[in-house]
C-alpha cells in the first residue's frame, strides 16, 4: 500500500484514482488548484501526473519542493492540438516531456508509463482482445520496480510491461501519440493501445 496523489481529476485521473483506491492504496486527487496539488503532493510517496501535457512542465516545476525525494509517474503526452482537439504535433519534438520533467526536477524520480493507449486501457488492460504493452522509461531501477507493482494492481501482467531503459526512451513512447488521431478517425473512439508482438 502506498500513499498516492493523483494530479488531475479528469477522464484520466478520476478512474485511475478509483482503481488505485480499490487496490488498497491511500489515494488523494487534486484538480487545477495549485494549493490543492501542493498539499496532496506533500503528503504522498508517489505522485501520478494525469494533467494535460501542454502545461504539465509549468505546473509540476512549481511543485519542485513538494516533489523532492518522491516518485513521479508521468502519464501525459505534451502535444500541440489541431482544430479537432486531437494531437497534431509534439510540443518537445527533440526531447520528451518526461526528460524535461526530470531535468527540471532533479531530486525526483520520474517514470514514464501508460501514455501509449487510450485512457480506459490504463485501468483495464484485459479489456482488449490482444495483450497491450505498458512501457517504462526512467533513470531509477528502484522507482521503476515500484511502478511495476502499481501497474500490477491495475491489472497489468508482468509480461505486458516492458522496461525500455533511461528517461530518454520516453521520446519514442511519447511520439506514439501521433498514431492516435489517425486511429480515432479511421476506427472511432474505441479503446486501443500500442503493443509489442513477439
Image: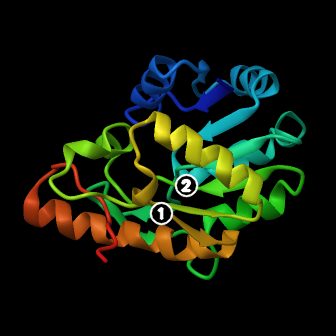
Residue reaching furthest to the left: 187
Residue 110 in the image, given as x and y percentages of width and height: 72, 54
Asked if labels 2 and 1 touch by Cβ distance under 8 angstroms, the answer is: yes
Q: Is residue 191 visible in the rendered structure shown here?
A: yes
Q: Nearer the viewer, residue 196 or 35?
A: 196
Q: Quarter holding the C terminus?
A: bottom left
Is residue 106 shown left or right of residue 29? right
Residue 69 placement: quadrant = top right
Residue 29 in the image, given as x and y percentages of width and height: 58, 21
Residue beneath disc 1: 79
Residue occupying image coordinates x 35% and y 71%: 178
The Cα–Cα distance between marks 1 and 2, rounded to whole angstroms, is 6 Å
Residue occupying image coordinates x 66% and y 54%: 144
Residue 151 in the image, given as x and y percentages of width and height: 50, 43
Is residue 24 shown left or right of residue 102? left
Residue reaching furthest to the bottom: 94
Amino acid at each position: 500500500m502506498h500513499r498516492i496523489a493523483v494530479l488531475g481529476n479528469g477522464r484520466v485521473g478520476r478512474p485511475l484514482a478509483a482503481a488505485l483506491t480499490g487496490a488498497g492504496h491511500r489515494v488523494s486527487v487534486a484538480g487545477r488548484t495549485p494549493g490543492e496539488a501542493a498539499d496532496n503532493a506533500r503528503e504522498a510517496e508517489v505522485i501520478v501526473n494525469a494533467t494535460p501535457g501542454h502545461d504539465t512542465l509549468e505546473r509540476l516545476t512549481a511543485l519542485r519542493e513538494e516533489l523532492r525525494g518522491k516518485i513521479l509517474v508521468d502519464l501525459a503526452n505534451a502535444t500541440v492540438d489541431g482544430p479537432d482537439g486531437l494531437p497534431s504535433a509534439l510540443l518537445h519534438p527533440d526531447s520528451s516531456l518526461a526528460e524535461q520533467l526530470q531535468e527540471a526536477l532533479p531530486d525526483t524520480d520520474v517514470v514514464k508509463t501508460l501514455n501509449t493507449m487510450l485512457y480506459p486501457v490504463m485501468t483495464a488492460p484485459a479489456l482488449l482482445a490482444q495483450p497491450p504493452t505498458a512501457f517504462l522509461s526512467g533513470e531509477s531501477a528502484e522507482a521503476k520496480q515500484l511502478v511495476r507493482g502499481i501497474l500490477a494492481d491495475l491489472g497489468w501482467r508482468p509480461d505486458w510491461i516492458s522496461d525500455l531503459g533511461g528517461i530518454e526512451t520516453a521520446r519514442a513512447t511519447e511520439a506514439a501519440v501521433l498514431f492516435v488521431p489517425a486511429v480515432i478517425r479511421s476506427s472511432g473512439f474505441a479503446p486501443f493501445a500500442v503493443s509489442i508482438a513477439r
